[in-house]
């Protein structure tokens, strides 16, 4: 009971709390059994709960299986490649793995029409489970690879692929997934707001193990919020490049409705509002791919409470997702506390957050991608930020007279969210504990090896073909305004 007045003098001062369920304790589905769980004030029994979750899971996955989207009367489901399931050890990804196996890979006894009937064909030729271990990124963190492997061993029809977070800085892993290594080992200076790039190929740091490179990269980030955002970004790219090398057309993640709402609010608050739709579903067009890889979150309509109930009633082993160490002022931590508390008192509001953000779309499209997170970049964001942000002009380094084979600054290649993550410092003081110059992830290092579409206002000059063994080589060169005017003088109209 809660009070809105003085109960000693006002008889109607006590206000009854709203019950956890709406009208009755009986199941709203079958209307016969006593309910076992309350979901957004609706009561369900255990027998009706399982098919309801399976239906929501299929509704969130199957419309995106075929290459061409189909209506409600879909024919057969047939993917163009394999399936990769991202497993973190948490409740959501464990429940997703169980649903994927039961629905599409387990041996079925209720088949109709014979085993060779088209409706009984496998949707994906092969399925794999991928787990990314992050223990080496932080001290005193336990390695959970074998625990996750043991939990996934019951799904024998799915191959288990373990990865480690330091693979993002390992050139041998990059070569194994089809990446082209860069002959120049590039580093970036985080103390410079333009993120000055330099070559450290001749330095002994090229032989440093990937683990020190990873720890140096994370320790140089300015805030704890930046660390908690960078780690999922690295994990996501590791999963995507693994999906590419395994011939997977779909990457499915166990992001529940609660986790999705947390991710949406946290991303918007950190400057990623332009790609808010990609938090729910996206298509990744990596180099060398004829068709994009679809990243799907089939549990985006299923809350954390429903996932926990499924895991308990089906006896699933939860290894638990490793928590990134950090302070209480981390934006992701604060957002999670807010959303979890909101779901407890107002459960319908959490689903409203996800539905509302799903309707958002940018006014203009993007023609390029961020070199770090590989998501769309909003055009003109660098000019806007230069006009609205305070810039540090002291210590500005003069540009080298030589024309290197790599860009001089990383900033033009980044989206607003990634640039903010790498450069925005906390008012409470910087978290920086390592060297300001660190190595870059392997896909960033490879993407900077040659001029790309990320370059801002490139002026191309053709080099003498006799010096290039018959192949065409293009070099970036900055021209002055007089030189550009002289180059197009023959096309200008004369004025009186």
Image (cartoon, helix red, strand yellow):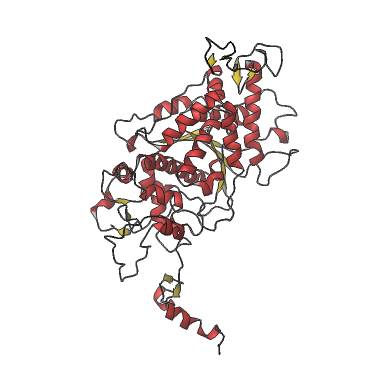
Residue lying at the far front in this picture: please name it: 9
Residue lying at the far bottom in this picture: please name it: 496
The N terminus lies in quadrant: top right
Q: Position of residue 340 (x, y in %)?
A: 49, 28
Can residue 168 be spotted in the picture? yes
Can residue 247 be spotted in the picture? no
Identify the residue at image location x=34%, y=42%. Answer: 223
Q: Is 31 placed left or right of 3 in the picture?
A: right
Identify the residue at image location x=35%, y=59%. Answer: 183
Q: Decide: is 450 above or below 318.
A: below
Of 95 and 281, the residue lying toward us:
281
The C terminus lies in quadrant: bottom right
Q: Decide: is 175 above or below 82.
A: below
Of 417 and 404, the residue lying toward us:
417
Q: Position of residue 456 (x, y in %)?
A: 45, 64
Identify the residue at image location x=66%, y=28%. Answer: 55
Q: Position of residue 275 (x, y in %)?
A: 53, 47
Q: How many marks?
A: 0
Q: Position of residue 392 (x, y in %)?
A: 32, 57
Q: Decide: is 11 above or below 356.
A: above
């Amino acid at each position: 009971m809660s009070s809105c007045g003085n109960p000693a003098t006002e008889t109607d001062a006590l206000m009854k709390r709203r019950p956890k369920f709406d009208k009755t304790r009986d199941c709203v589905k079958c209307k016969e059994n006593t309910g076992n769980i309350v979901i957004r004030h609706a009561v369900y029994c255990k027998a009706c709960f399982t098919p309801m979750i399976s239906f929501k899971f299929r509704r969130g996955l199957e419309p995106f299986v075929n290459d061409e989207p189909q209506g409600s009367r879909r024919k057969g489901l047939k993917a163009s490649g394999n399936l990769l399931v991202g497993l973190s050890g948490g409740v959501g990804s464990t429940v997703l793995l169980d649903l994927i196996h039961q629905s599409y890979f387990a041996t079925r006894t209720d088949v109709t029409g014979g085993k060779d009937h088209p409706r009984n064909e496998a949707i994906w030729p092969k399925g794999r489970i991928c787990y990314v271990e992050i223990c080496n990124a932080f001290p005193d963190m336990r390695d959970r690879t074998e625990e996750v492997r043991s939990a996934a061993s019951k799904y024998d029809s799915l191959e288990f692929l373990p990865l480690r977070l330091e693979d993002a800085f390992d050139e041998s892993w990059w070569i194994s997934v089809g990446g082209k290594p860069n002959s120049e080992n590039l580093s970036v200076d985080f103390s410079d707001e333009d993120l000055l790039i330099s070559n450290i190929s001749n330095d002994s740091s090229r032989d440093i193990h990937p683990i020190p490179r990873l720890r140096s990269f994370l320790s140089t980030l300015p805030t704890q919020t930046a660390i908690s955002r960078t780690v999922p970004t690295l994990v996501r790219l590791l999963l995507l490049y693994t999906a590419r090398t395994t011939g997977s057309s779909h990457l499915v993640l166990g992001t529940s409705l609660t986790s999705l709402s947390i991710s949406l609010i946290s991303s918007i608050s950190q400057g990623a509002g332009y790609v808010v739709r990609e938090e729910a579903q996206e298509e990744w067009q990596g180099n060398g791919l004829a068709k994009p890889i679809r990243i799907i979150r089939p549990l985006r309509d299923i809350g954390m409470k429903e996932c926990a109930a499924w895991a308990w009633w089906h006896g699933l082993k939860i290894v638990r997702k490793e928590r990134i160490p950090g302070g209480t002022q981390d934006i992701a931590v604060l957002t999670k506390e807010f959303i979890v508390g909101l779901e407890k008192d107002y459960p319908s509001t959490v689903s409203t957050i996800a539905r509302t953000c799903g309707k958002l779309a940018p006014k203009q499209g993007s023609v390029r991608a961020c070199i770090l997170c590989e998501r769309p970049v909003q055009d003109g964001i660098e000019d806007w930020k230069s006009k609205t942000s305070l810039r540090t002009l002291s210590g500005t380094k003069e540009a080298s007279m030589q024309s290197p084979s790599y860009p001089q600054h990383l900033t033009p290649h980044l989206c607003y969210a990634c640039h903010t993550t790498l450069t925005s410092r906390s008012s409470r003081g910087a978290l920086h504990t390592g060297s300001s110059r660190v190595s870059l992830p392997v896909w960033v290092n490879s993407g900077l090896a040659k001029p790309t579409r990320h370059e801002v206002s490139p002026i191309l000059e053709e080099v003498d073909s006799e010096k290039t063994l018959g192949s065409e080589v293009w070099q970036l060169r900055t021209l002055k305004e007089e030189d550009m005017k002289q180059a197009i003088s023959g096309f200008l109209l004369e004025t009186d």
